[in-house]
Image (spheres, grey):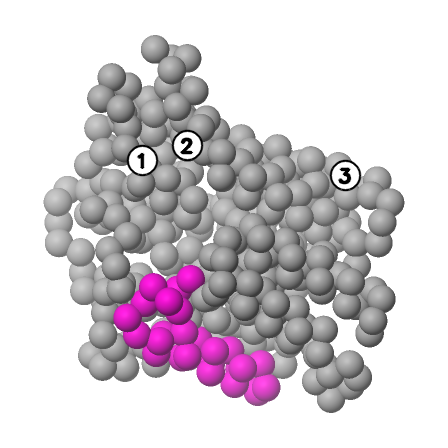
Amino acid sequence: MTKKIVQYAFIQTLPVLCGYIFMGIAFGILLERGGYSFLWAFLISLIIYSGSMQFVLIGLLGGGMGLFSVILLTLSVQSRHIFYGLSFIEKFKAMGKTGWYMVFSLTDETYSLLCGMQIPKELNEKKVFFTVAFLNQSYWVVGCTLGAILGGFIGFDTTGIDFAMTALFVVIFIEQWTSFKSHIPALVGTGCGVGALVIFGASAFILPALIASVGLLLILKSRIPQGEAQEACQ
Amino acid sequence: MSLEFATPMLVILVVAVCTFLSRFLPFALFGGGKEVPVIVKTLGELLPPAVIAILVVYCLRGVHFAIAPNGLPEFIAIGIVALLHIWKRNNLLSIGVGTISYMFLIQSIF
């Protein structure tokens, strides 16, 4: 039974395995270049476990940004999670203690797998959920740690590998651009980002850009058609 | 404890707690079957694309447009990522090819 569950979960998570190992290694290399050993990479991927936020985190580790800004930035970057959780409230509750781990480990990728799986009836759904979530985090922790270890030994010139982070956000931007009914939120963010960068400069623009975006979106909200172009889950 | 250890550790813990809170929020607020407040729903829905756009700007904050190569490598590489992604819709392919192209551009051409 357990063997069948692990087998099924492993096959389901294969695409995530490729993605997490690759992005994890890119993160590990970047972190190592920033002067932090693989132990930091292990700790970060173990307790934060968030692709986009970990890439942003590298720039914050030096402590240049105030704690309040760090809190606001993190909550904003992760605000999409509000919707992920809503689809699984009853199911995770029914899982008891492992439900806490499910809440913690609900990344974009795990969410989309949990939504999309057609679990065979003979398998225990709760155990499949947990195994999928656990396998995904294992891939991520291995990728991040491995990247930071390899980073010290890589022979070729890694200058420019930090573009992986830019590319990741551009990909998410395009995904959201095509799946959202309205392009106003993306345009508001672009406008506020560029505007704040020009006014406040590279080291202090994120917080004003976020505050301006929240304000503008609240003002414009009645004019923005809401809902995704197609329902993602349930 | 040295500052070199304490500062990153503090930042990591704060980000970890906030990340968990954002994932836990829907369960804390609406676990009892309560109605989701409209403002939370609205921001949860409208904010993500805006934040991602700001993060793209954040990634490009160090690019000097007035000084050669005028951000050309960044724009070419972003173009490659965007076109590839619109065409193939494969995250790994778009990010991988885009990153390698960028590394090639700044190491060998510009």
Determine which quarter of the picture holds residue A220.
bottom left
Q: Nearer the viewer, residue A168 or B12?
A: A168
The residue that disc 3 covers is A150
Determine which quarter of the picture holds residue A12.
top left
Magenta stretch bounds = A175-199
Structural crowding at the residue carrying mark 1, measured as other residues with C-alpha within 10 Å and reported as few (<14), some (14–19) or many (≥20): few
Q: Which residue is pictured at 46% across the width and 26% down the height?
A: A10
Q: Residue A40, position in %: x, y? A: 67, 40
Residue A183 higher or lower than A124, as above or below:
below
The residue that disc 1 covers is A117
User: Looking at the picture, which amino acid does disc 2 mark?
Assistant: Gln
User: Looking at the picture, which amino acid does disc 1 mark?
Assistant: Met
Host chain of mark 1: A
Point out the frontmost of discs 2 and 3: 2
Q: Residue B47, position in %: x, y? A: 36, 67
- Determine the secondary structure under disc 3: helix
Residue B39 higher or lower than A23, as above or below:
below
- Determine the secondary structure under disc 2: helix
3D distance between C-alphas at marks 2 and 1 = 8 Å
Structural crowding at the residue carrying mark 3, measured as other residues with C-alpha within 10 Å and reported as few (<14), some (14–19) or many (≥20): some
3D distance between C-alphas at marks 2 and 3 = 28 Å
Residue A194 is covered by the magenta coloring: yes
Q: Residue A202, position in %: x, y? A: 64, 76
Q: Are callouts 2 and 3 both on one chain?
A: yes
User: Looking at the picture, which amino acid does disc 3 mark?
Assistant: Leu
**Marks 2 & 1, CB-CB < 8 Å contact:** yes
Q: Which residue is pictured at 65% across the width and 68% down the height?
A: B77
**Marks 3 & 1, CB-CB < 8 Å contact:** no
Q: Main secondary structure of the magenta part?
A: helix
The residue that disc 2 covers is A12
**For this view, does A204 lie left or right of residue A177?**
right
